Amino acid sequence: MYSAMSQSETVLSEQLHTLKLRFAEQLEAKIQVLAGRWSALGGTLEDSDALHDLELLAHNLAGAGATFGYASVSETARALENIFSRALDPASSQEINPSARIGHLIERLIRAASTPSEPVAMGGKLARGKSETGRDQRLIFLVDDDREQASLLAEGIRHFGYEVRVFASPRGIETALARSRPDLVLMDIIFPEGPSYGLECVTAISDPQVWGIPLIFMSSRDDFEARLAAVRAGASDYFQKPADPIKLIERIDQLTAVNQPEPYRILVVEDDETLAEAYALALRGSGMTVEIVSEPREITRCLDEFDAELILMDLYLPRCSGLDLAKVIRQQEAYTSVPIVFLSTEGRLDRQMLAMSLGGDDFLTKPIRPDYLVASVFSRVQRARVLRSFMVKDSMTGALNHANILESLRSEVARASRSGGRFAFALIDIDLFKTVNDTYGHPTGDRVIKSLARLLQQRLRRTDVIGRYGGEEFALILPDTEATQAHEVVDALRGCFEAIRQSAGSQEFAVTFSAGVATYPQFENAGSITEAADKALYLAKNRGRNQVVLAG
């Protein structure tokens, strides 16, 4: 029978829940320690040892808060950590009146600790963090002596979920790198000290640990000598100023990516439970996620719930042959492209060819060595995933295309109906997009669409589903999300998108979007959900645009 959660996952979930409760019990005391040590300094930033201790306290709170359901604690503590870090680094740009801001942030931290950003959840669900991705923010060091341009660029990068620390000079950068390791360094080449000073400073760094950090140079220089010197200095890329912000973000995404590909999902259909577990053990040992079905009647439900990328099926099953079951699967449009690999002791070539003609993609003869099983399944599912991405994704944005976001919505309705769950569906439409195209041209309009797609991909969780619903319209499926929370998430995205500085040549401009949000089970099927979200979007447009409306 189909098993929804393995024993190890259950144990992990219980352990995570226990840790969350423990964190909540200790949080207030940790914040009081930080507040007390700051009070002891009397508002000054002169004692480097004390500042270093405060930086570590803030760092620990920033790293742990969102993990245990306190996203606001992480956000506020991260801001404190940034101030203490800059105060310790003479090369870093300084805030005006940082002491007053520190006091304000500590008060905010105390308030944020009183209630979690979301309830402590069972089941090992990732909490919504500041970057909405379920992982810590990635840190960028930006080194540029043009403070105004550096500030604008840093703000633009932050909108895509990164933390950015700005340095006015590469002097002392090695010290900063030793104290706080970033995920990427973005550095100008030209400084007052010379036209290649940035290159010279990087080349002079002696710490071997630094060389593993991705490095992007950007400069008004576009000569061959500068590019060659950048390569020799270990640069991962080179952008001429003014850099296209979307292309820059895409490259930063690539160089700082920490997410491993999702494990391949394999459904084993085998009536011999011991044998099925042996196959599952081999496949799980290679990092794949495996579910087992021993009863053919369960196949459709399991396919719906598990979203298998490959079916490993015995040719001979009780009460239903593998050939007949394959035909049943192929009758359902959603599963016509899922590879089916037959397993059997059948050695007759004509029977193997028949199996292939009736919907099979490969045939493996029992007994099969575990390493050969893994290699065969891996190569087949790898190709299937690549082909599927071409079929289901929009080529320009990488989001699901219209047909497949609707199919995902229907699947989410089915899952939520069976489990008693809830989710939110949002329709997003870029405001006055025709004016953008008419004013700045279609290539600029395409970049605006890509910037919204990139923002959604960066700021949402892995479990959220993003689709391109139409030309400038996107759809979101937010599992395990209630109406109020969905409104907050989409409205935060709206604010981030509005703040992005779009560009067309030397011109800069801002673009907004409107959105409508509907939730399940308030609306009980895919048709009523999309209709409700569309009506809410229409209201958002009529009420003046640049807002999010919840379907009533």
Image: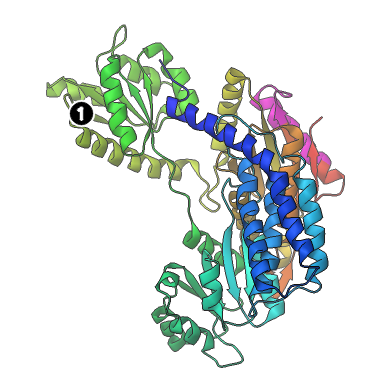
Which residue lies most toward the right here?
543
| Residue appearing at x 79%, y 32% in the figure | 551
Which residue is identified by label 1? Answer: 364
| Residue appearing at x 76%, y 67% in the figure | 41
| Residue appearing at x 67%, y 82% in the figure | 146
**Residue 140 lies in magenta, yes or no?**
no
Residue 550: where, in percent of width, then height?
79, 36
Residue 70: where, in percent of width, then height?
68, 44
Q: Which of 158 and 61 is in front in this view?
A: 61
Q: Which of 378 and 70 is in front in this view?
A: 70
Q: In this view, does 306 lie to the left or right of 267?
A: right
Determine crowd level at label 1: few under 14, some 14-19, many 20+ residues with C-alpha closer than 10 A.
many
Residue 127: where, in percent of width, then height?
62, 40
Amino acid beneath label 1 = Leu
State whether residue 331 appears in this view. yes
Q: Which part of the image, by quadrant, shows the N terminus?
A: top left
> Main structural element of the magenta stretch: helix, strand or loop?
helix
State whether residue 502 appears in this view. no
Q: Which of 194 and 503 is in front in this view?
A: 194
Q: Nearer the viewer, residue 315 or 169?
A: 169
Q: What stretch is highlighted in magenta?
A: 519-539
| Residue appearing at x 56%, y 29% in the figure | 123
Q: In this view, does 291 lie to the left or right of 495?
A: left
Q: Which part of the image, by quadrant, shows the C terminus?
A: top right
Res. 39 image quadrant: bottom right
